[in-house]
Amino acid sequence: MRGCETDAGGRIGQPIGASTTTAQRKGIQDFQALLHQGYSRTPSATAAAAAAQPPVPLALAPPSRPCLRPDDHAKVAKPKLVIFIRKQNRVLLNLPHIVTACRRAGFAPHVMNLRRQTPLPAIHAALSSADAMVAVHGAAVTHFLFMRPGSVLLQIVPVGLDWAADAFYGKPAQQLGLGYLEYKVAPEESSLAAEYGVNSTVVRDPSVISSRGWWEMKKVYMDRQNVTVNVKRFGELLRSARLHLKNATACGKAAATTAAAAAAR
């Protein structure tokens, strides 16, 4: 999965879920179910058992968010939020402040520093039990496929990467039933502002660089950019994520069931 992007039909080089046809939406959902089944399987499971067991869709909401009365919320463990960090480019330069903001918003943050040798089952275990994920745009965001419908993906989008962030990860995440939020890095929050000037064409009009082709765009916006998130603005998104989690619980599912039953009468 790392470093490779395919659509639901398995074609290399296209955004995951780029097509919005019903068949391909179903395809990405089946692919997620297959991943969950494979990485949740115990080592003793046999190939024969796997063949006999079709992929089972994930539950509609994170299991850690029960339906509660308003005065019960303080008694429940904080929702788990996984933060993926990068080390070479698109680095979160104020990571400690981001972790603090997550705690203040009511999350239990877990920082993951992925390496090439990080086992995929370990990543699956971390995300399938998570309520939210935060990551700067990049290949690691692909691991949203391990998340449960009803959880939240919060993608930090550096300058010049808006289209790719939405097409590669935003739309597919929503097709899988995830809440999707974007934090768009402001010009002054990008390291490119210090390198080229905050009012430079590179920072203010990325389309000029993008028009020169993929490799030129990659060299500037993907390989040479780091970000310093505005903690106050980021905190507002975190609060939106908490609100989404409260709404995407068994309460919402129960209400939908009641409404369907009433409509059938």
Image (cartoon, helix red, strand yellow):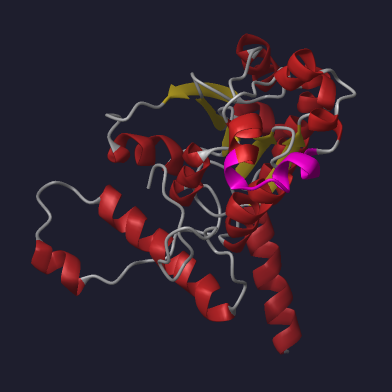
Closer to us: 188 or 238 = 188
Q: Is residue 56 magenta?
A: no
Main SS of the magenta part reads helix
Q: Is residue 214 magenta?
A: yes
Which image quadrant is residue 262 in? bottom right
Residue at point 57% right, 28% down? 223
Question: Is residue 112 shown to the viewer in this render?
Answer: yes
Asked if residue 222 is positioned above or below residue 162 in the image, the reply reads above
Closer to us: 56 or 255 = 56
Percent across and percent down for residue 158 are 70, 32
Q: Is residue 139 left or right of residue 184?
A: left
Percent across and percent down for residue 108 are 56, 23
For the record, the magenta segment spans 206-215
Q: Is residue 55 left or right of residue 165?
A: left
Residue at point 18% right, 73% down? 52
How many numbered discs sit on the rendered protein?
Answer: 0
Residue at point 73% right, 89% down? 265
